[in-house]
Image: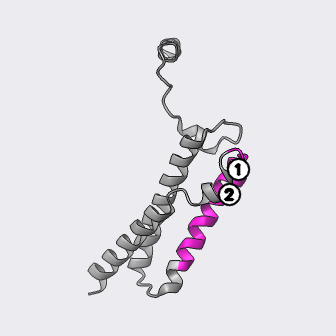
Amino acid sequence: MKVKKSKKLQQQQENGHSSPFKLGKLFDSDASWDKDQLGDVLHWTRQVVALVCGLIWGAIPLVGGFWLIFFLGLSTAIIYAYYALILKVDEEELGGHGALLQEGLFASITLFLLSWILLYSLAHF
C-alpha cells in the first residue's frame, strides 16, 4: 500500500503537481518554508486565535478597550513564538518581523470583534 502511495506522489511531482500539505510540517523546525506557505499558516493560526479569544471574551463577559489591546498582544506573542521558537525560520529571508507579525492581523481583529460582540450580545442581553 505504501509503495502505491509513494509511486503516486512521485508521479504527481513529475507531472508538476505539488504534494499535499502535511500537518507534521507545522511543527517541524527543519522544514523549509516559502513566504506564501508560511504566510498562509500564520494567517489561519491568527484567525483561530481570534475566534477562540472572541468567543471566550464574549462568554465571560469582558468589556473595555483593555481586552482588545490584550488580544492584540496575545495574538502577536503567539505568532512570534510560533515562527521564531517552534519553526525557527530566518525572518529576514521571509520579509522581516514586521511582515510576518502583521500577516492576517486586520482580518483577525475583525473576526475577534465580530465573535466577541455577537456572543456578548446574544448571551448577556
Q: Please provide percent x and percent y for residue 90.
A: 73, 46
Which labelled disc corresponds to residue 97? 2
Q: Identify which residue is drawn at 47% across, 17% down.
A: 12
Main SS of the magenta segment? helix
Q: Please provide percent x and percent y for residue 104.
A: 49, 58
In the image, which residues are magenta?
69-93
In-image side of 86 versus 102 (left or right): right
Figure check: 60 above or below 23: below
Residue 26: quadrant of the picture? top right
Q: Which amino acid does label 1 sit on?
A: Glu
Figure check: 40 above or below 105: above
Q: Please provide percent x and percent y for residue 67.
A: 51, 81
* SS type, badge 2: helix
Q: Which amino acid does label 2 sit on?
A: His
Which labelled disc corresponds to residue 91? 1
Q: Distance between the residues labelled 1 and 2?
A: 6 Å
For the image, the number of numbered tags is: 2
Which sits earlier in the primary sequence, circle 1 or circle 2? 1
C-beta proximity under 8 Å, tags 1 and 2: yes
Q: Identify which residue is drawn at 39% across, 78% down.
A: 58
Residue 28: quadrant of the picture? top right
